[in-house]
Amino acid sequence: MPEKPTILIVDDAPENLSVLSGLLLPEYGVRVATSGTRALQVAASTPIPDLILLDVMMQDLDGYEVIKRLKADPRTRDIPVIFVTALSANEDEYRGLALGAVDYIAKPVKPAIVLARVRTHLELKQARDRLRDENARLEAEVARRSHQREQILLCAGEGICGTDAHGHIAFLNPAAAAMLGDTREALIGRNAHATFHPPRRDVGPETPDTCPLCACLCGGHAIHRREDRFRQKDGSLLEVELTCQPMLEDGVSIGAVTTFRDIGERKRYIAEIEHKSNFDALTGLPNRNLLTDRIAQGIARCRESGALLAVILINLDRFKAVNDSLGHAAGDNLLQEAARRFAAVTPGDVTLARNEGDEFVVVADTDDEQTVTRLARELLGALAEPCRLAQRQFFLTASLGVALYPRDGGNSEMLLHNAAAAMTRAKHAGGNLMKFYAVEMNARALERLDLENGLRHAIEHDELVLHYQPQVRLSTGAIIGAEALVRWQHPRRGLVPPVEFIPIAEQSDLILALGEWVLRKACAQNRVWRESGLPPITVGVNLSARQFTSQDIAEMTGRVLRETGLPGSALELELTETILMADTEAFIHATEGLKGLSISLSIDDFGTGFSSLAYLRRFSIDRLKIDQSFVRGLREDSSSAAIARAIISLSHSLGLSVIAEGVETREQLAFLYAHACDEVQGYLFSRPLPADAFEVLLREGHALALPKPEETEPFRGEATLARLDPAGHQN
């Protein structure tokens, strides 16, 4: 009865040894080792294991070190090793294969897979052992049993070539001839070294002392599993792994047998794994893994030279809006275009990598900050020309943050972290600029994170409140509406100004939840006022660009109106010019849905963006709001007064009403009244009020004291001129 194959199981976890032993004992002889050191001892003792199941993560020697030592020991180098591990990254698999492992089994193990893999590799080992033994026998009896040898060689899948004492090919099997791209008849009798390593025009002939076959013939030493490159008949290279065994008779070399196999596919697979682990699939740039290594190399280089190492983190501004509005395919195209433009201005000795998402990193040795600043300007300038995607034109900008070694960090993690803090500061400053890292930036980043977490909690637990600023009709002085403004009473910070937390919400996904919360709260409150018998008003709610690009705004608004029971005619949505200009077709589609709900639409802060009469004619807008910056400068700045008059005239010519915000003085009120502005809001009449205080104003019928004739007298001439067309006729 044949002996059972012996399997050595190596694992420092007793439970794993128990599971694998119980699984294999019925069919195989099992030996166990609980450490890498013990495994090396057992593997080298009799009986030599036929197969080793080796854990990777162990205390004294890990699996990688164990397999290195096994392959270095002639007694154990040919034992097939299967790694049994929970590691699954490509680089871990590549490392194991490169060290000589024949397979991987993932933990937790599946019995059927373990048995199948063990059976397969035992069969492969037995086949290799048989072939090795047969080759050895052939080497000893090649002269007497040439016919039998020829028949055996014809069946072998590996290339097998026999040479005489002078290195001439005496025989070779069909597999060898096929791999060399020639016929057996043409190859027999030729010099093996000259056949395998013919001269090349670009580098000349290879010398015999580098040829393993020549070394085997001359030195009489066997060579096992050495990698080499053979040149095929057509000139292409063949990657091979070869073994050379000298043939001796009475101690005298009579030739050698060389077996070789094509390992090109395996090397291509390993190279592909290595490339995937180091380069970004979308842009072809180095990825985070290779970037970390490049920064470490740069730090070591600059430590010796005394130079600075600049780490420039680049983040594309408003990239998420492109992804949300046009889809990820368009976003990917934009990232590829940005990568090409950055590469075009990046010097050859500078690393350009894609970090993650819409972030890129440049790593450069430098002598001073001025050089870094020039490079940063070139990177920003690379985005100056517009990009075209899906028949649309986009202007890309980026925010750059710079950290310098050794000032801002001593390792890649710290340098990237601090560059990100500087980039965030640049983005908060409006984007399209570069900032160097400063120590206080991390404190600001932590403060911002604390505010973001607090805001998320406030939204989820209904801790925000709305204040309402009255809007007054100038023809009567009566309250006809209110703008809903969100306020946050922080438990530790007190009242947090909207200017601090609204940008945080805009830059995260919180703006969607916050926007819907404000809309729902304002609609519900207006419904309460209406049911209380108060004069009906329209409540205005501000919308952000993110709400338009990241959701179906008409569907969300319609749902809120249905759930709160407020008619659409009692709601006004205030939009910014940024929303209008981002994607006009999408905006028109959305506003058509909103107008179908009878909702009024106004453009907030009109005149501060990219105002266009052509666009206004296409949009279903009901009202324009004059920004308070123009109202504030009505008397001191003639251009502000001219802009305010133009907006009023434009609104009326298009059939729109106009409201001015930020009215704080009687003089401002008189100007607007004289120029036929329809409505106003501002501290002159009332600050934003809590809901109960605003209700008192409505219930008691508070009204704005309209300007007297003597107050408007200074503006009557201007108002008359404003009503005349260029020919001098009254409008």
Image (cartoon, rainbow, N blue to C red):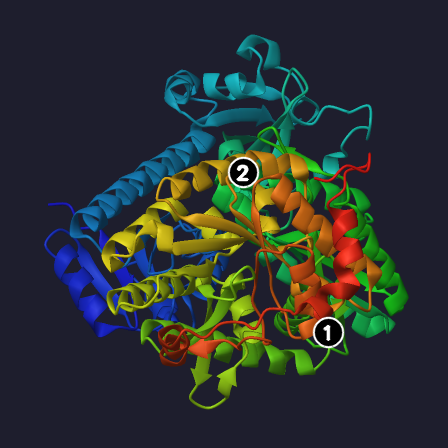
Residue 717 pos. (x, y %): 80, 55
Q: Which residue is mark 2?
A: 619
Q: Nearer the viewer, residue 399 or 686?
A: 686
Q: Quadrant of residue 304?
A: bottom right
Residue 351 pos. (x, y %): 73, 54
First of labels 1, 2 by sequence position: 1
Q: Quadrant of residue 481?
A: bottom left
Name the residue: 29% across, 40% down.
Answer: 126
Q: Residues within 10 Å of mark 2 (few under 14, many from 20)?
A: some
Residue 180 position (above or below residue 299): above
Q: Nearer the viewer, residue 207 or 87?
A: 87
Name the residue: 38% across, 79% down.
Answer: 696
CA gap, disc 1 to disc 2? 44 Å
Name the residue: 48% across, 46% down.
Answer: 324
The secondary structure type at the circle numbered 1 is: loop
The secondary structure type at the circle numbered 2 is: loop
Determine whether, in the image, residue 61 is placed left or right of residue 17: right
Residue 657 pos. (x, y %): 56, 49
Q: Amino acid at mark 2?
A: Phe
Name the residue: 52% across, 31% down.
Answer: 257
| The residue positioned farthest toward the front in the image shown | 709
Q: Which residue is mark 1?
A: 437
In which quadrant will I find the C terminus? top right
Q: Which mark is residue 260?
A: none
- Whether residue 436 appears in this view of the structure is yes
Q: Amino acid at mark 1?
A: Tyr
Q: Nearer the viewer, residue 658 or 675?
A: 675
Q: Quadrant of residue 414?
A: bottom right
Q: Nearer the viewer, residue 590 or 191?
A: 590
Determine whether, in the image, residue 165 is placed left or right of residue 3: right
- Whether residue 351 appears in this view of the structure is no
Determine whether, in the image, residue 405 is placed left or right of residue 585: right
